[in-house]
Amino acid sequence: MRERLKHKYALSEQGVNDMIKAVIIVTIANLAFMVPVGLLYLLASDILNGGIPSSKLPMYIGGMVISILLIIITTYFQLCGKWSQKTYTGREIKKDSIIIFR
């Protein structure tokens, strides 16, 4: 797979490594943003069924805390990670620049 990415996108070895890391962290970040939606669905379901049972309250509080932590961690890795300051070809870029791929 690495060789295929390398040839298809004309990447260096470091570029392939960075691209794979980026794909993994973006996938994890997308999953982290889906957790609160699932919690909201469960909460709405409980509210429509007559109220939130006290036995499920720790699940909702824990789920909210875990969701917030996951979002903060994945956002940190996307924006502040060591490899986030390079494009997937390995060239240095400015932190405040915007890159648009077409």
Image (spheres, rainbow, N blue to C red):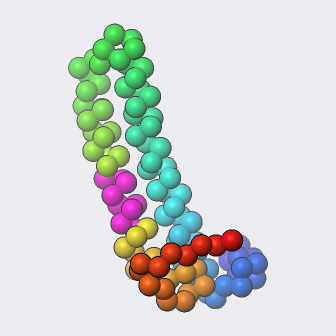
Q: Is residue 31 above or below residue 11?
A: above
Q: Is residue 20 above or below residue 59?
A: below
Identity of the residue drawn at 56% across and 87% down: 90
Q: Is residue 91 above or below residue 28?
A: below
Exactly how many numbered labels are in the figure? Answer: 0
Residue 91 in the figure: left or right of residue 71: right
Q: Is residue 13 above or below residue 40?
A: below
Queried whether the magenta region covers residue 74, the answer comes back as yes
- Counting from the top left corner in percent of width and height, residue 53 is at 28, 17
Q: Is residue 3 visible?
A: no
- Counting from the top left corner in percent of width and height, residue 80 is at 37, 73
- The majority secondary structure of the magenta stretch comes to helix
Q: Which residues are magenta?
A: 69-77
- Counting from the top left corner in percent of width and height, residue 58 is at 24, 31
In which quarter of the view is residue 8 placed? Answer: bottom right
Identity of the residue drawn at 37% across and 18% down: 46
Residue 51 in the figure: left or right of residue 75: left
In which quarter of the view is residue 61 placed? Answer: top left
Q: Is residue 89 visible?
A: yes
- Counting from the top left corner in percent of width and height, residue 55 is at 26, 21
Identity of the residue drawn at 48% across and 56% down: 28
Image quadrant occupied by the N terminus: bottom right
Identity of the residue drawn at 60% across and 85% down: 89
Image quadrant occupied by the C terminus: bottom right
Queried whether the magenta region covers residue 82, the answer comes back as no
